[in-house]
Every structure is written in structure tokens, then in C-alpha cells.
Amino acid sequence: MEQQPRLRIGFVGTGHMGAAMATHLLNAGHQMCVYNRTSGKTEALHHLGAEEASSPAEAARDAHVVFTMLTDAPALEEITFGPDGILSTLPAHAVHVSCSTVGPGTNEDLARAHSERGAQLVAAPVFGKPDAAAAGKLWVCMSGPAEAKQRVRPLLETYSQGIHDFGEAVGAANVVKLCGNFMLGAAIEAMAEAFTLAEKSGLNRQQVYEMFTSTMFDTPIYKSYGRMVATEDYKPLGAGPQLLEKDLNLVLDQARTHGVPMPFANIILDHLSATVLRRRHDEDWTSFARRVSEGAGIER
Amino acid sequence: MEQQPRLRIGFVGTGHMGAAMATHLLNAGHQMCVYNRTSGKTEALHHLGAEEASSPAEAARDAHVVFTMLTDAPALEEITFGPDGILSTLPAHAVHVSCSTVGPGTNEDLARAHSERGAQLVAAPVFGKPDAAAAGKLWVCMSGPAEAKQRVRPLLETYSQGIHDFGEAVGAANVVKLCGNFMLGAAIEAMAEAFTLAEKSGLNRQQVYEMFTSTMFDTPIYKSYGRMVATEDYKPLGAGPQLLEKDLNLVLDQARTHGVPMPFANIILDHLSATVLRRRHDEDWTSFARRVSEGAGIER
Amino acid sequence: MEQQPRLRIGFVGTGHMGAAMATHLLNAGHQMCVYNRTSGKTEALHHLGAEEASSPAEAARDAHVVFTMLTDAPALEEITFGPDGILSTLPAHAVHVSCSTVGPGTNEDLARAHSERGAQLVAAPVFGKPDAAAAGKLWVCMSGPAEAKQRVRPLLETYSQGIHDFGEAVGAANVVKLCGNFMLGAAIEAMAEAFTLAEKSGLNRQQVYEMFTSTMFDTPIYKSYGRMVATEDYKPLGAGPQLLEKDLNLVLDQARTHGVPMPFANIILDHLSATVLRRRHDEDWTSFARRVSEGAGIER
Amino acid sequence: MEQQPRLRIGFVGTGHMGAAMATHLLNAGHQMCVYNRTSGKTEALHHLGAEEASSPAEAARDAHVVFTMLTDAPALEEITFGPDGILSTLPAHAVHVSCSTVGPGTNEDLARAHSERGAQLVAAPVFGKPDAAAAGKLWVCMSGPAEAKQRVRPLLETYSQGIHDFGEAVGAANVVKLCGNFMLGAAIEAMAEAFTLAEKSGLNRQQVYEMFTSTMFDTPIYKSYGRMVATEDYKPLGAGPQLLEKDLNLVLDQARTHGVPMPFANIILDHLSATVLRRRHDEDWTSFARRVSEGAGIER
């Protein structure tokens, strides 16, 4: 691979995922200015050479590229449009790489605002758990203006094992991300129903899990989520139920807008909402699977 | 592997799957007597050395082991208990290997009847499409008396890439088979909803399919069923919708018996039933995915 | 109304509903012989002049008409076909009035057995709670041979405010009964969802209940079930959740047989099953509504 | 009833429902200025003495009370906040009576804007079909500031048979309206499933309909919607499926916001969306019931 030019990168949102991604960008030799609402979370990156900004605006000032990796659309909008937001300082010709899981409309709004100032937005949500981020093995979905995508692709490659380009419509990659989170939820619910049926029929959940994940469903996804569903030990916490509740709401907003029946998505969201309302704070979102075993009268 | 003794095997039910399995047993050197309701389907096996029986009773006479691979429980019960059924001739100490997809209760009934005459039943349903059967790469789930399983295991190995033993309760393997077919249906419905959401959002179904089946859902199952869902070309016909409708009914019978809520299974069955009623005769059961795209107003 | 001839009536199954119906028949001047599995339940009828039988066979001996009002199909089949069952003594030309909530196939089987001996069966399930039975205000659905229906109609009139004749196919009235119980369940679930949405939006469940049941849903059904759903005080116990779970299973068996999608029925049954498994023993089946409020995080 | 003072009323939105309501207000002796986007619809009211305004602002100028009865929230917001909107002219101390079916948040936003100028908003959605409006027999749900409600109550009485006051929280009445439309949809779906089950079991839909609507479900609602479901003749068009699709979307928005599982609402919306996409333009929204009979393979 040819030598990449050293870029000035702003990075806003350095939680588990963001910090891992920023680390790869730093390791690739780029100059970085980081911002996080709670400042403790930027310290490790500072030790790797990143400058710490006191606001999103400061992180974006003079940047060639600014990354954002935030919890939800309101946070992303605040960090972009708010006072001291990145919109106020991001240079013309810079690119905003928007990695958060948000609806397509959110990135479309941001792209419009940026384009009025000569900057561009690339949507680049990722698939993978924090350990995949740490290993630089995320999967990236990307959409936005061709030239901007070309410029940021080498940066995305620092933390990914594959980049999928969904064209110029800036919200497209977000739709794919929402579809993916929905499909994960569907796999979890399917295992919850199957394992609970097996258990109530006198079988061992764990053995059924091992059978399926060593044959037809032999993938890391089924194995890692399935282990939680099989043992009903929903730890460690990768992402909480309220995060995925938000995502399933976005899925169904999109479905409503386009008149798509998504009965599976409805069920997953109902289970997630009930889980949020009674949540145990150290459990992963996968724990919505407990709605099935509880519904079958299983108490543990 | 040590030399196996040459056994006399009866084989009843030589459709696509049964014929492939019987071929492997013949190739392993066993003596075989085959029976199928429509006699044309035993001809190929005859050319490989199998004797053709004129009734199930004749196929089972003097057999060490009799295999049955039939469409549904009524067919299995007819072939076992009916006039000229295998129960009338199967020798004491013989083993009935019951491979059909039926509810656990059906095999329990058969096992009881056999045991009154000194014979035994092993439930041994399989996972895999006809091409996997032809390649000897099926996955087998097995349950029943330990000694009987030990005797038939070398036979099952002739056509399988793995055998999973679910203990002595004779219906256990059938529960696993039902769980598996349900999980396949859930994967199909999940893709149908996701790809349709993507399409109505302006994306290309095929590209979304390729993304997911090369990343998080990179398995033959998602690839083969997903290709049909992505292209909405539901060919070739592997198994018709009426077959899987029967299976999902068995799943839900089992769920009702044990009080397990299975909202996903309900949805899949509703889609399958609607598909059976309007079916196009050369399409695979996967075509129930069309209920989603049609519900979203897509006409092709 | 012309004077009715005095008939010899056998009455099997004298729970809350059966006892009230039998009382009306006695009050109309008929001769009666009653049987109940637990004998204490026939005492009050004995004081009104009924003879107490020691078996169903004895209750049916010499009867012009035998009524059965039992919990479920197995009980009805035992009382009919079992040793000392009514089939063994019911005279030729007598009529069996089958009032239990069973699937159409059960009554078809019974009718076949009776007709071999020259007797006939009329299916005559009822709608109404015990207090309606006491007041002689049940609604009766009836099906079976025309001549037999004509003979028993005056008897049914003693406890009903209306008789609906669904023709000669003996199971037809049972299908209507199943449809009705399903529709009651749907009304309950609809109120549970609506009232819970109102409550979580800051409104008073009770006030919303009063609004709807004094306007668009101003019927005794919505009022009596709705009061329970509004207050979440599911007493008194009219019918337990396990009884209606049985009925919804019959509904869905019938739906599966005929390929009818019934997504509402699926949901009601899932809620009922979960309720049976955790049931509080003095609560009405309406308490399945609690699945909605609990799913919304409401604890009382 | 004591003599009411003659008020100056603005009325915006004179479709079927609005025109009937305005007629009653005119007949009660009030002075009225009407506005509708398409001017032909105000002519009949002009003949009854109403002045015709060229904009919402003109209709609201000098009014004591302004009524709005519009299709959806965007229309209501445009007519209120838009250029020439009622906000620009409505006098301090006037009351905006907002009758449209919108989410509670919409009226809350409007109320806030009005209160900044000294005016007030009362939410007053109605239940009833156009013929009930013509007869002055609507049911009104009302919420908002006590003093404002007291002032407009005599006006609401001109077209209603009952007014239900849900307190001061301005969005409360809208929640009740949404709950009611959901409950209507649930009744329709329940009948669709029941009647289709009956039909496929060999019974006559019409007869089953007559049984239920003359016994347990003997209400105008079940009768009028049920007749359409029984005959599958979904005329006349009272409200189109796209209108109720909007309402069910509002129901589910509210459910999502508050974490309420509404599985019935999900099903109704899926059926409505599919119906909108293939709609026959002269059919009532009740035609979503056809999703059930079509799913059961019935073609008419």
C-alpha cells in the first residue's frame, strides 16, 4: 500500500468503539485532536499523542477530516449544530465521517448543512463489537459523495476488515446498519424461542446451542449471542438494551415511512422495551431473550 | 475406521433425501431391501444392488435395521402400523431408524409398539439439502436407547458429517429438528424484512444481501436462502411450502403443549400457510418471503 | 307457548354453568337424572327433584335427551365412550345435546358413534357467564340434524334468550363458539393495550374505560371485562386462564387446519399461556391483560 | 338551557366532518367565518350565513373561538403557524378548539405558541362517522385549561351527544382519540379473523356476523364495520386507509415513546399499510380486513 499523507483528524466521541477506532488512526500516523463530553475518556488517546480539545468546534478546527461516533441522533446533532459545534469551524473541503447509528435522515440533514459551507459528509457506520474494533476488524458501510469517500477510505481501512460502498445517497449506509442490527435481534429472538422450546421439551439448552452453532449457524454472531441465550447469563455488557431499543425504533420509523411490514421487528422492539423498563444494569441487550423464557414460566 | 459387519437393511421412503442416504449405505457394502409407495423411485437403488420390496413389511423382514424417511407422521404411521407395515415383520432385536421430520410423540408411539416386540427405535432426523445428502454431508441428530444408537451409528456415519446425540428420550432429536427448521424460517423472514426495507429505502437488495452474507452472516444457510430472498427467484425447489407448513405446525403444537410463546414461529407459519394456498408449484418454501415484499406493495 | 311434554333428561356435568342450565330444565317440569364426577355438585339439583346417578351410563339410561356440559374434549370423550359412558345406555332415537366448548371434530366423532346406534347428536354450546345462566339468559348456538334440533329446541329455550341455528353440519356451532371466545379475548387485549397506553401517557385508566364503555363500546361484554382491565383487579373468577387457553388452542388448531392467518389469536394465546404458568388461583382469565401492563413496566 | 351569547367563530377545515360541525354552530345562532383550502367546500355554509375567508388568518381575526378540523398534523401546523396562519391574527383571550386527530405533542406545541400571545387551546377530537356529525350525535373528548373548556363547552354541545373531559393536560384528549381509533381497528381485525375462520370451516360469514352483532357485540360499531367485513363489500368510503394508517402511526409513536407493547396495533398498521399500497380508491379503511381473507387464500 502506498504511503498515506499525514492528515489532521478531529475525533468526537471516544467511548469504547470510538476510542478503538481513533487508536488505529493514530497508529497509522495521523495527527489527531479528540473531544469527548466526559473528558476522562480522552486520556488514553492523549498518551498516544492526540491533542485534547475543549469543544467539538476546537476538534474540528483546521481538520482535514472529522470523525463522530456518538450514542444517538440528538447527541450527533448537538455536537454538529450546537454552540461550539463542529459546523462552526469545520473548514471548507473537509469531510465529516459520521459513524454513529442514526437514521438516514439525520445524516442527510447534516450533509445539507455541511455542503452549504463547502464541506462534505460520508456516512460510515460500523459492525462489530468493541473487541473487533480493538483488533481493527470492523466492517464498514459507507455512503456519500464519491470523491469524499475516496479521500477517507484509507482512514476507514485502518480499523476495518472490509468496506462496503452503498453509493452516493448519504443515508444509504445507515439503512444497512439498521438492517444489520435488526437481523442480529432476529437471530437472538429465534434462538430464544428455539432454546426455550427445547428446554421445556426436556432437552439441555446448552447442547442444542452447541449443535446449531457447530452446524448450520456456525458463525461468531450466533456463537457469541447464542452463548448468552443458552446460559441466560447476559454478560458481559456489550451494548445496553436502551441502545438497541433506539435502533429498533429507527428501523420501525424507516419501515413506517416506506410502508414495509416488519412483524419480527415489532416483536423485538416490544421485548427490548420491556427489558429497558426492568433492566438489570450490567446486562447486555441480548437479555431481551429472557422475555421468551419468562413467558414460558421459567424462573431462574 | 474398523471394518463394519455387513448388515441387512430395510429402507422405506426413497425420495430425494432417502435415495441419497440409501445410496451411501449401499456403497458402504450393506445388503438392502427398499420400498417406496411409487415404485419408480427405487429403480436407481436396484441398479446399485438393492432388492425391491413390494411392501414395507417385506422390506423389514429379516432386517437388522430398517430406515424410514417419509413425508409426514401419517405416512410414517401407515408404513409402520398399517397392513403390511414394518411392525408386522421387523424381527426382535432389530432397530428402526426413524429419519422423518415428525413430532416427538410420533416416534414415542412407534418406540412403544416396537419395544413390545423386542425391537427398538432410534430417532435420527437430518439437516441438509438434497445436495448435502448426495455428498454424504448431512448433520444427524440422534436419540433413543444407548445400545441401539451404538449399533446404528456407523450406518448414520455413511451419510453424515457429524452426529449429535441428544440422549435416551426417543423424541428429543425430533425436537431439535423442529427447532432447526424454525430457525431457518426465522433467518428467511429476517432477510425478507431487512432486504425489503432496504429496497424501499432506495438500496439494492442484492448488494445488501452480499454485504451481510460476506460479513456477519457468512454461512451457507444465509447464502443459499438469502440469494432467493434477494433476487425473489425462489428456485430451485428444495422443499415445498406445504412441507415446512407441516413442520411449523409441529413446532407450534410442541410450543402449545409446553406453554412456550413463539411469536416468530406464528408469523412464519402464517406466511407459509398463505403461500401454500397461492403456491406456484415450482417454488421453494423460501418463497414465503414474498409475503413481506407484497405487503410492502412491491409487484414484480 | 304450547304445553311441552314431560321428558326424561339425563344431565352430565353440573358445574356452575351446567347446574344453572339443569335447574331451568327441572323448573320447566322435566324429569331429570344428573351425574357429576364429584358428587357434591349434584346435591342442589337433587333438592329440586333430580335423581342422582352413579355413572354417566345410569344418567343416560331410558333418557329422551342427555345433556353434557364438561370442561374439555377428553372429559366429554370419557363420559361418552368410557366404561359406564352414555354411549352404552343411550336409547335409540334419543338425542345427545353436547354443550361443552370443544372442537368441531369432537362432536363429529360423537355424532358418528351415536348414529350407529340410532341416536343423534346436537351441538349446542352457549355464550354467557354463570349469572346469565342463572337468569336463563344464555345465547345458544345449535347445529345438527334438523329433526333432532326441533325436538330439543324447547329445552334449550328454558335457559336461553336466543337460539342461533347453524345448520346440519354437527360441528358448525362449535366453530361459532370458538370464534366468540376468540373475539372476547381480542376485546380484552385491545382494552389492555389502549388503557395501558393511556396510563403511561398520564391519563386515568378508569376514566378512559368509562368513556369507551359509555360510547362506542357500550355493551355488557366490554363493561364487565373492561372493568377488570381498567382496575387490574381480575376478580371474581368466572373462568380460569387454563380454560380459555384450551379454547384458543382449539381456535388455532382449526385455523391451522384451514390455513387461516390469525395473528390476534396467536397473541392472545401467548398471553394466556404465560398467565397459566404464573397464575394466581383466584383470578379470571381476563388477567392475561396484565401481560401488557407488565410489558410496559407497570408494577402494582 | 340558558340563552347563549352570540359568538364570532372562525372555522377552518370544512370537509365532511367539519362542515357538519360548523352547520350546528351556525344553527345555534353564532356568527361564523369559514376557510377551506379548496374553496368549493365552504359554499353550503355560506348559504347558511357564514362569511367566507380567504385565509386562516382572516377566519381567525376578531374571533372569540376558532375551530380547526384538518386531515393531519402538517395541515394543522401549516394553518396555525404558516404565513396567513391563525396564530398571526387570533386575538388574546380567544380559544383555539383543535378537533383534528393528531398526536398529543402537536396540540401541546400549538398551546404553547398561543399562550405566548394570551390565547388558549382546547383539544376536542370527536368520535363518530359523518352521519353522526350531521345528526349532532358526535362524542367529544376534551382537554385543556379549565376556564377555556368552560367557555367552549356550549359550542361543543351543539354537535355532540356527550362530552368527556380528560383534564388540563392539553394532549390528553388526543391520546383518548388515538386509543379509540386503535380499538375500532382491533374490532375489525378480530371480526376479519373470526369470520374468515368460520367461512373456511364451511359456515356462512353473514350468519356468523348476525349472530355476534345481535348478541355479545350488539353495538352500532360492530354492526356497521362488521357488515363490511362479513360481505367484503367495503363501501361506502367513510375514511380511507391512509387516514387510519396515519392514526395508527401516531398510536405507535406514542407507544414507543412510553415503552408500551402494542402487538395488536402493530398488526393493524401492517395490514393498513399493505392496503394503502394496493388501495382501491372507493373503499373504506375497513378493507384492511381483506388481508386476512386473502392470507387464507380466499379470492373474490
Image: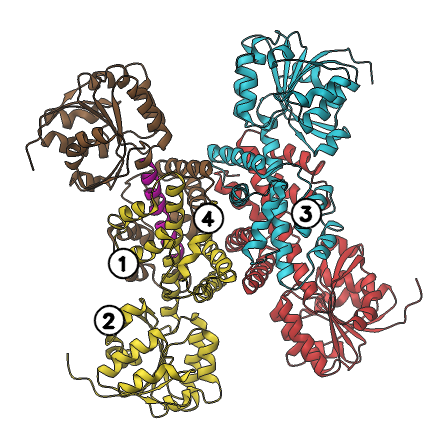
Chain colours: A cyan, B red, C yellow, D brown
Given the image, what chain letter belongs to the residue carrying mark 4?
Answer: C
Name the residue tied to disc 4.
C299
> Marks 2 and 4: CB-CB under 8 Å?
no
Q: CA distance from mark 4 to mark 3?
A: 27 Å
Q: Nearer the viewer, mark 2 or mark 4?
A: 4
Instruction: Say which element carries label 3.
Output: helix
Q: Dot 2: few (<14), some (14–19), or many (≥20) neighbours within 10 Å?
A: some
Given the image, what chain letter belongs to the residue carrying mark 2?
Answer: C
User: Residue A33, image x and y in percent?
Assistant: 69, 13
Q: Dot 4: few (<14), some (14–19), or many (≥20) neighbours within 10 Å?
A: few
Predominant SS along the magenta part = helix
Instruction: Say which element carries label 1.
Output: helix
Q: CA distance from mark 4 to mark 1?
A: 28 Å
Q: Nearer the viewer, mark 4 or mark 1?
A: 4
Magenta span covers which residues?
Answer: D174-195
Name the residue tied to disc 1.
C220
- Mark positioned earlier in the residue sequence (4 or 1): 1
| Quarter where residue A7 is shown | top right
Mark 3: amino acid: Met
User: Residue B208, image x and y in percent?
Assistant: 63, 34
- Mark positioned earlier in the residue sequence (2 or 4): 2
User: Residue A172, image x and y in percent?
Assistant: 59, 26
Q: Nearer the viewer, residue B51 or C241?
A: C241
Mark 2: amino acid: Ala
